[in-house]
Image (cartoon, grey):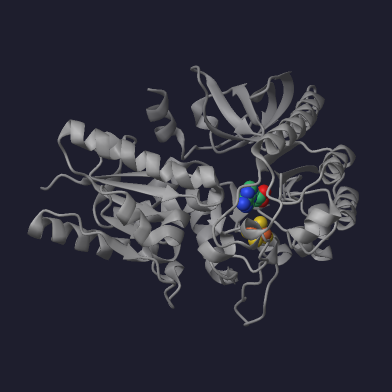
Amino acid sequence: MTEPRKLYVRSFGCQMNVYDAQRMTDTLAKEGFVETDSPDDADLVILNTCHIREKAAEKVYSELGRLRKAQEEAGRSQMVAVAGCVAQAEGAEIIKRARAVDLVVGPQSYHKLPELVAEAQARRDGNGKRAKLVETEFPVEDKFDFLPPPTSAAITKRGPAAFVTVQEGCDKFCTFCVVPYTRGAEVSRPLSKILDEVVRLADSGVREITLIGQNVNAYHGLDAGGRSANLAELVRRVAEVPGIARVRYTTSHPRDMDEELIAAHGEMPALMPYLHLPVQSGSNRILAAMNRKHDRELFFDIVEKVRAARPDIAFSSDFIVGFPGETDEDFADTMDLVEKVGFASAFSFKYSPRPGTPAAGMEAQLPEAVKSARIHALQALLDGQKAAFDEGCRGRRFEILLEKPGRFPGQLIGRSPYLQSVVVEAPVEAIGTLAMVEVREVSTKSLSGDIIGGEFFAEDSKWESRFTRQSEKLEA
Ligand code: 5AD
Ligand code: SF4
């Protein structure tokens, strides 16, 4: 019997890439590839790249340089593929700049990986050279119809919280953003296909689903009757799948937070009380220059309505500082918005000009020193809010989903409704169950607490974990 070939996938960037990496692994598993945790003993290395900011995009070239050096030192020649948004945006350029690349594949063509890898292998077997294939067209077929679903073993290995892509691409064209160019126009997957995927995940023990997309609250997939379903309906249908206890969605645009979705936050206990809603800036002048299609007042309005519907909701957001033309007053407006809303957590970035986007050509690009000073001030404010939110959880009781073993034997790590990591003492058999905890300690990275009840811990519990075997392996 031939040895299975080994595959190593390294993902950069957002959750879409994490999900895509899993689908690529599932596709190649059918061709006899098994996953390895180390690039060194892999036969095929896939770099799943991100193009959102310059720093993220540059990482792929340094990673390719590192790979080439390691290959030369070890005297071997692995097959290397570049996938993700840098592949889509820079295609042939990658082949030119990095000699150690066999193939470049854009996000819409992952279902073609088996044939691309086979072709690259055949060319190598023929003339010993790298094939240098580039596949970055937007194909007419839907890749999801061709990507094989994960096996039950693969689902169990990935744990009880899973991502499901429900829409891809974006039609909003914020002036700083490459997504509409790299991921293309907004496309929603049909409702029934998403539900089939969720049922399959739930059958293998998954308890929490995060519905993901570049602009997920613009979701408008068709249902069986050919009617368009919105995100509120999708969330409801997903929460009804037996076994699913928690639903989240990310990432959203304020413009697409419709009344029905806001009401769903109040009506559905399974929809977690934590909403990531990027605002980018608190200045109406900058929001207009960013083509965000909303002002700060609309954002305040949404926050107020969601809080009224679900009083225990917490918010997270994305911010960009140093957008072209941002004045001290504009930045003060951003700080003011943060103070008024209060965030449980947030991501903030210095504006990074991206090739082909309108903002990259705007005059009044700001000096690096201004961007640095502003990001420090903003992050200090946001860090303080996060610390205060975490501190406010001390003594609180909430449910956590036990996901994996902790650092020390006898410990498990779960996630709170607010995505905080919570360390508890519990047996590995409890992985995949919901436990009620009382939070005892709070640190910058995690909370810890005592279990006071839950599915596994109830007196008459008959819970049999599907995750035990994998957990034992992790612990060993
Ligand atoms: N520069 C800096 N940050 C950016 N983002 C998107 N494009 C850029 C850019 N050109 C940030 C936004 C977005 C998040 C995913 O990345 O805040 O919400
Ligand atoms: Fe980019 Fe704006 Fe679309 Fe978000 S909404 S993906 S920031 S264009």
Identify the residue shown where x is 66% and y is 37%. Answer: 419
Viewer-nearest residue: 237 or 228: 228
Q: Where residue 454 appears, x then y in whole percent? A: 67, 33
Q: Where residue 196 appears, x then y in whole percent? A: 52, 64
Q: Looking at the image, can residue 165 be seen?
A: yes
Compared across the picture, whether 118 is left or right of 343 comes to left
Viewer-nearest residue: 463 or 213: 213
Identify the residue shown where x is 83% and y is 48%. Answer: 282
Identify the residue shown where x is 86% and y is 50%. Answer: 303
Q: Looking at the image, can residue 246 be seen?
A: no
Viewer-nearest residue: 222 or 356: 356
Q: Where residue 296 appears, x then y in whole percent? A: 86, 53
* Quarter the C terminus occupies: top left
Identify the residue shown where x is 44% and y is 41%. Answer: 59
- Of all residues shown, which one is farthest toward the bottom? 226
The picture quadrant where one finds residue 437 is top right
Q: Is residue 392 above or below residue 287?
A: above
Q: Is residue 226 above or below residue 387?
A: below
The picture quadrant where one finds residue 342 is top right
Q: Where residue 329 appears, x then y in whole percent? A: 87, 44
Q: Is residue 132 above or below residue 222?
A: above
Viewer-nearest residue: 61 or 400: 61
**Numbered label tally:** 0
- Of all residues shown, which one is farthest toward the front? 363
